[in-house]
Image (cartoon, rainbow, N blue to C red):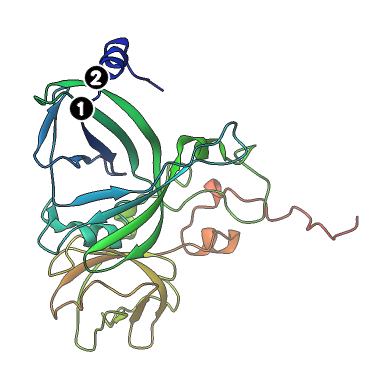
Amino acid sequence: MKTATPSLINFLASTTEFVMAELYDLTLADGTALHYTTFDRSLQVGGTTYLSGPPNFTRGTVEEVIGVSKIGTLSLEIHASPSDLIGGVPILQKIARGDFDKAQITVRRLFMDSALNQQGTVIRFVGNIGDLDQLSRTMAKFTCKSKVEDLNIQLPRSILQPTCIQTLFDSGCTLNTSAFAVNGSVQAGRTVNKLIPNFTQANSYFDNGQLVFTSGTNNGHVAAVRTYTNSGGTVYFFVPLPTAPGIGDTFTIYPGCDKTQATCTAKFSNLANFGGFPYVPVPETAI
C-alpha cells in the first residue's frame, strides 16, 4: 500500500496549519466508478474529479490489525435524499437492490496548505463494502472489510459434493440465459411481495430464479424469486419490491436451479456440465 511521499512528510513536519479532506473512490460490481469528497467543494485530484455531494460520506475509525487472523473493518455511512441519483436511479434505491454489494472502496486523506494547494494523500483504507447494517429513507450504513478478506477462500476451489458447484448460466454451467428467459407483464392482484403473471410453466419452475423489470417504476430492479406456483401463476419474492409495480409493467424472469442432478437433467438437459458428485458416500456411510 502506498504511503506518504517524502514531500508530504516534509510538509507535515514543517507546518502546524494545514487543511484536510477525505477522498472516497468506489467501484461497483458493474464497473461504475464513483468519486466523492468530504470537502465543502468539488476537488480535482490527480486528474480525477471528486464531488462534494450529496451523497455525503461519514466514517468511523479504521480498525487495523497485524497479521491475517482478523480482518480490518471500517464503518461507513452514506447520507442521501430520494432526489440524489446515480445513473438516473436514487442512490439509496441502488443500495437497497444490492448494487453496492462487494463494491471496492478506497479512502484517502488529502492534505492541503492554507491556500488549498494540494500537498499529497495518504491511504487510510482499502477494501470492499460488506454488510448493509442499516438502511433508512436518508441513510445507509455499511461495514467495510479490508482486502485481507480476499484471502478467506475455499481451497481447493472445487470440492467433491453431491450438489453442483456451478452457478446457473456461468461459464461452467454453459447454459445461455436468453434461451430460458420468459417475458411477461404485471397483471391485477400484484403487490410488493408477489406478481400474478399467469404463466403456464410447471410448479416451482422459477423457484430461486430472478426477475428483472424492464419498464415502470421498478425498471432495472432485479428481484430474487422465492417460489412460483402454477396455480394462478403466482411469483413470490424473497424481499419486497421498492414500490408496487403498475399493471402492464414488463419484466423478464429466469428459472432457478436447486443444483441437483435430477434438475440438471430433466429441467435443463445439461447433465454433461453437471458439477456435482451425487454418488459420493455421506460421512456416516460405512462401506
Which residue shows up at 43% across the image and 64% down it?
Answer: 256
Horizontal side of 20 relative to 194 (left or right) equals: left
Residue type beneath disc 1:
Phe
Horizontal side of 152 relative to 5 (left or right) equals: right
Pointer 1: residues within 10 angstroms few (<14), some, or many (20+)?
some
Count numbered badges in the picture. 2
- The circle drawn on residue 88 is none
Horizontal side of 115 relative to 119 (left or right) equals: left
Secondary structure state at the residue bearing disc 1: loop
Q: How far apart are marks 2 and 1 (CA)?
A: 7 Å
Pointer 2: residues within 10 angstroms few (<14), some, or many (20+)?
few
Which residue shows up at 34% across the image and 58% down it?
Answer: 141
Question: How far across and down, in percent of the image, does residue 52 sit?
Answer: 13, 43
Question: How far across and down, in percent of the image, does residue 156 sit?
Answer: 64, 37
Where does label 1 land, which residue?
A: 18
Residue 97 in view of the camera: no
The quarter of the picture where residue 90 lies is bottom left
The quarter of the picture where residue 201 lies is bottom left
Residue 76 in view of the camera: yes
Please name whichever residue, 276 or 64, is drawn nearer the observer in this view of the structure: 64
Please name whichever residue, 123 or 280, is drawn nearer the observer in this view of the structure: 123
Would you place residue 270 above or below residue 221 in this image? above
Which residue shows up at 23% across the image and 29% down it?
Answer: 110
Residue type beneath disc 2:
Thr
Disc 2 to disc 1: CB gap under 8 Å:
yes
Would you place residue 189 above or below residue 210 in this image? below
**Residue reaching furthest right?**
287
Which residue shows up at 22% across the image and 41% down it?
Answer: 32
Question: How far across and down, in percent of the image, does residue 73 sit?
Answer: 46, 44
Where does label 2 land, which residue?
A: 15
